[in-house]
Amino acid sequence: MIFTETKADAKAFGTLNYGRFVPLHGDLDQGSRTRILNEFRRPESNTILVATDVAARGLDIEDIDAVF
């Protein structure tokens, strides 16, 4: 999981080719946010969640290996 200061920074990770980055920010509707979080929570998931500082306030996710 990576935290960024801005939505633009979170979105920029989605263009990188060396990992499966999934941005989570305030411009997404609730259905999209729920889908992204459910995918990230799956034990076999290989996604890297990239959330803005604001989006991070309400996250409750167990068993995270690394936070940057």
Image (cartoon, rainbow, N blue to C red):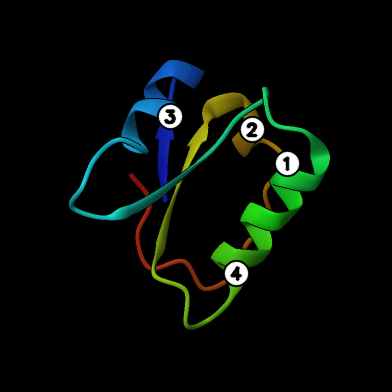
Taking the image as shown, residue 12 lies to the left or right of residue 24, namely left
Q: Which of 26 and 31 is in front in this view?
A: 31
Q: How far apart are labels 1 and 2 at the CA level?
A: 7 Å
Mark 4 vs 2: CB contact within 8 A: no
Q: Name the residue under label 4.
A: 41
Position above or below: 21 against 52: below
- Residue drawn 52% across and 29% down? 52
Determine whether label 4 and label 1 are within 8 Å by CB.
no
Q: Which of marks 3 and 4 is nearer the N terminus?
A: 3
C-alpha gap between disc 4 and disc 1: 15 Å
* Secondary structure at numbered mark 2: helix
Mark 3 is on which residue type?
A: Ala
Measured in 3D between alpha carbons, the distance from the residue under mark 1 to the one under mark 3, in whole angstroms, is: 17 Å
Observer-side mark, 4 or 1, equals: 4
Which residue does the numbered mark 2 point to in the structure image? 55
- State the image coordinates of residue 21 (x, y, percent, origin top left): 38, 48
Q: Which amino acid does the dot numbered 2 rest on?
A: Ala
Density class for disc 3 (Cα within 10 Å; few <14, some 14-19, many ≥20) is many
The quadrant where residue 57 appears:
top right
Of pointers 4 and 2, the one earlier in the residue sequence:
4
The circle on residue 10 is: 3
